Every structure is written in C-alpha cells, then in structure tokens.
Amino acid sequence: MAAAKRRERGAAAIERVQTGVRLEKRLLKVLKGLAESLDLSLGDLLEGMALHALENKPPFSATTLKKIADLKRVYGLDLTAGDSHRLREKS
C-alpha cells in the first residue's frame, strides 16, 4: 500500500551514501558497459538490480539480456550465478 501511494505522489525521496565495493574485474566492465548503454549511472543500475532481486523479480528485458550476453562475450566474462559462492581472490 505504501509503495502504491508513493507512486501516486511521484518519485520517492531518498538519501544516497557513498560506498566502496569490490567486484570481479570483468563483471564490473560488463555492468559499466550495460549502464552506459541504458544511459544510467552504475549506481542507478545496481540499485535497480538490487530492488528487483529483493522482490524476486527479473530486472532485465529480453533485449537487455541480449546486450548483456554481448558484453559478457566482449569482456570474457564466463562466470555464472552458480560460481557466486565459489569465488576466491588470486594470490
């Protein structure tokens, strides 16, 4: 109900904070490329992805998924969701 009322009023007022996160290098390149192609900041892209994930909703259209596949090929990103709990830093 609160979300519906917020949509009626327009954009939600929020407070953003600066954060430092570490991401796998090729994944970051894909995300930056995707954000650029969607004319979004990296932060806006990550916020949208997180909000969708927290509601168990897919964040991307078929067209965007094709763009992601292209970017993954360009940057050599071969990691999948199944790899997420098995990643380790190089020494």
Image (cartoon, grey):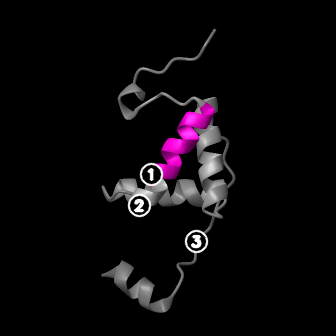
Q: Mark 2: which amino acid?
A: Ser
Q: Nearer the viewer, residue 56 or 32?
A: 32
* Residue 82: x %, y % from top left: 35, 29
* Residue 4: x %, y % from top left: 35, 83
Predominant secondary structure in magenta?
Answer: helix
Q: Which residue is mark 3?
A: 14
* Residue 35: x %, y % from top left: 62, 55
Q: Which residue is mark 1?
A: 65
Q: CA distance from mark 2 to mark 1?
A: 6 Å
Rendered image: mark on residue 8: none
Residue farthest to the top, as pictured = 91
Q: Nearer the viewer, residue 12 or 86?
A: 86
Which quadrant: the C terminus? top right
Q: At numbered mark 2, what does the secondary structure look like: helix, strand or loop? A: loop
Residue 65: tell me if it is visible.
yes
54 vs 14, left or right, is: left
Q: At numbered mark 3, what does the secondary structure look like: helix, strand or loop? A: loop
When asked about the image quadrant of residue 38, the answer is bottom right
Q: Mark 1: which amino acid?
A: Leu
Q: CA distance from mark 1 to mark 3?
A: 28 Å
Q: Which residue is mark 2?
A: 61
Q: At numbered mark 1, what does the secondary structure look like: helix, strand or loop? A: helix
Q: Tell me if mark 1 has few (under 14), some (14-19) or many (20+) residues whose alpha carbon lies within 10 angstroms of its own.
A: few
Question: Residue drawn at (53%, 78%), measured in percent from left and top?
Answer: 12
Q: Is residue 85 one of those drawn in magenta?
A: no
* Residue 68: x %, y % from top left: 51, 47
Q: Mark 3: which amino acid?
A: Ile
